[in-house]
Image (tube, helix red, strand yellow):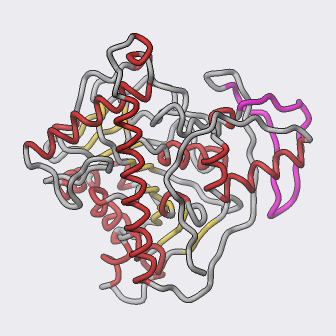
């Protein structure tokens, strides 16, 4: 993820007093220091629900349109950030060197014709030949076998992982598109009208159609996190996403909820050509999420990563524009400020693609 996107955890120190409230409220407490020796807040807010009739065609048309705009914006950002990488300043810029690696992998996958639809794979979590084989290897992991609740990213190459999660009787937790309209949705097989609905439930439309939106007050324990990647280092566990930062945001929010901790395994499924050895660990940012396990069509790799995992939300890295797009973050920020009497800091401004205003 890029430095001017999302780097999430708490950027201020809480007072030593412990504040707590009953159900459907929040609690504040000090946690062990993160990489920046900052403290975190845990809280609860009301669930977000939308019981209006679901317009499937409108949802999908709007999602595709907004995804196209987001990719155009990322392409523009990539071109801007990599236009002058020859200077020492830009060589140390996390935006620049990350885009160089991403572009190399996207180009390679298209050139070798291992990319799968939707194509071109540029500015996406790339779908790839053998994604189902990688998913089968993931499904054979002991970590997956014992998991009761699995958080899976909504991208194409992980569709089979979502199917294995549901068909195995597990609870599927998946984010709503770019967190535009809420937070996460939960899907379980018993929520589906027919067995044949399971394939549809693994798509963004199906999640919106059959899933139950949850809020930050949801009492949930996530046993396994599946995350998409553009490039990943099998030796260090360092990972690059497509550059928008939502995977890091989702991880930080789940961390704040107490749904995950450092011991929660993070797994990615990629093509073998997405394995790299040139992600400089020393240049990673505090929000970057490392992976513990990599599944490809041909192998399973345990990285034994030593890269620290993000501890929560880094408000001083969250731009006003990103905050303005994501309602659940605005609610959280307002609640914390009211209860602590402290104004949270804000990150630098950034230019973002248009966000959705879903039809209600």
Where is residue 297 drawn, in percent x and y?
A: 16, 47
Left/right placement of residue 309 relative to residue 306 reads right
Q: Give the quarter of the figure containing the C terminus.
A: bottom right
Where, by quadrant of the figure, is residue 133 drawn? bottom left
Task: Give the main secondary structure, helix, strand or loop, of the magenta stretch.
Answer: loop
Q: Is residue 330 above or below residue 210?
A: above
Where is residue 131 drawn, in percent x and y?
A: 20, 54
Q: Is residue 20 magenta?
A: yes
Query: Which residue shows up at 40% across the image and 69% down it?
Result: 204
Where is residue 39 drawn, in percent x and y?
A: 74, 30
Where is residue 55 drawn, in percent x and y?
A: 48, 85
Q: Is residue 349 magenta?
A: no
Query: Which residue shows up at 88% across the image and 39% down it?
Result: 18
Q: Is residue 300 above or below residue 236?
A: below
Where, by quadrant of the figure, is residue 199 drawn? bottom left
Query: Which residue shows up at 28% across the image and 51% down it?
Result: 138
Residue stretch rendered in magenta on the structure: 11-33
Q: Give the quarter of the figure containing the N terminus.
A: top left
Q: Is residue 307 above or below residue 341?
A: above
Where, by quadrant of the figure, is residue 97 drawn? top left
* Residue found at the far left of this picture: 112
Q: Is residue 30 above or below residue 296?
A: above
């Amino acid at each position: 993820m890029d430095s001017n996107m999302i780097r999430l955890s708490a950027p201020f120190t809480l007072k030593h007093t412990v504040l707590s409230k009953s159900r459907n409220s929040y609690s504040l407490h000090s946690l062990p220091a993160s990489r920046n020796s900052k403290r975190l807040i845990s809280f609860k807010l009301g669930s977000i629900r939308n019981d209006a009739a679901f317009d499937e065609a409108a949802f999908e048309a709007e999602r595709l349109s907004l995804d196209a705009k987001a990719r155009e914006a990322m392409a523009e950002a990539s071109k801007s950030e990599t236009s002058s990488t020859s200077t020492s300043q830009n060589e140390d810029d996390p935006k620049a060197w990350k885009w160089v690696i991403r572009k190399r992998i996207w180009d390679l996958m298209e050139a070798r014709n291992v990319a799968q639809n939707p194509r071109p794979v540029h500015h996406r979590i790339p779908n790839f030949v053998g994604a189902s084989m990688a998913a089968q290897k993931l499904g054979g992991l002991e970590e997956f076998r014992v998991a009761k609740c699995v958080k899976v990213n909504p991208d194409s190459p992980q569709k089979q992982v979502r199917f294995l999660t549901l068909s195995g009787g597990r609870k599927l937790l998946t984010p709503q598109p770019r967190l535009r309209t809420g937070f996460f949705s939960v899907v379980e097989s018993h929520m589906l009208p027919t067995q044949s609905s399971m394939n549809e439930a693994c798509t963004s439309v199906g999640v919106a159609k059959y899933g139950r939106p949850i809020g930050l007050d949801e009492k949930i324990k996530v046993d396994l996190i599946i995350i998409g990647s553009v490039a990943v280092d099998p030796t260090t566990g360092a990972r690059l996403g497509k550059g928008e930062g939502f995977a890091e945001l989702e991880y930080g929010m789940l961390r704040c909820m107490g749904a995950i901790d450092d011991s929660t395994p993070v797994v990615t499924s990629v093509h073998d050509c997405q394995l790299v050895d040139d992600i400089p660990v020393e240049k990673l940012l505090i929000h970057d999420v490392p992976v513990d396990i990599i599944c490809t069509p041909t192998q399973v790799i345990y990285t034994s990563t030593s890269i620290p995992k993000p501890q929560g939300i880094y408000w001083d890295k969250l731009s006003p524009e990103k905050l303005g797009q994501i309602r659940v973050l605005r609610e959280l920020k307002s609640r914390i400020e009211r209860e602590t009497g402290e104004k949270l800091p804000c990150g630098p401004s950034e230019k973002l693609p248009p966000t959705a205003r879903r039809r209600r």
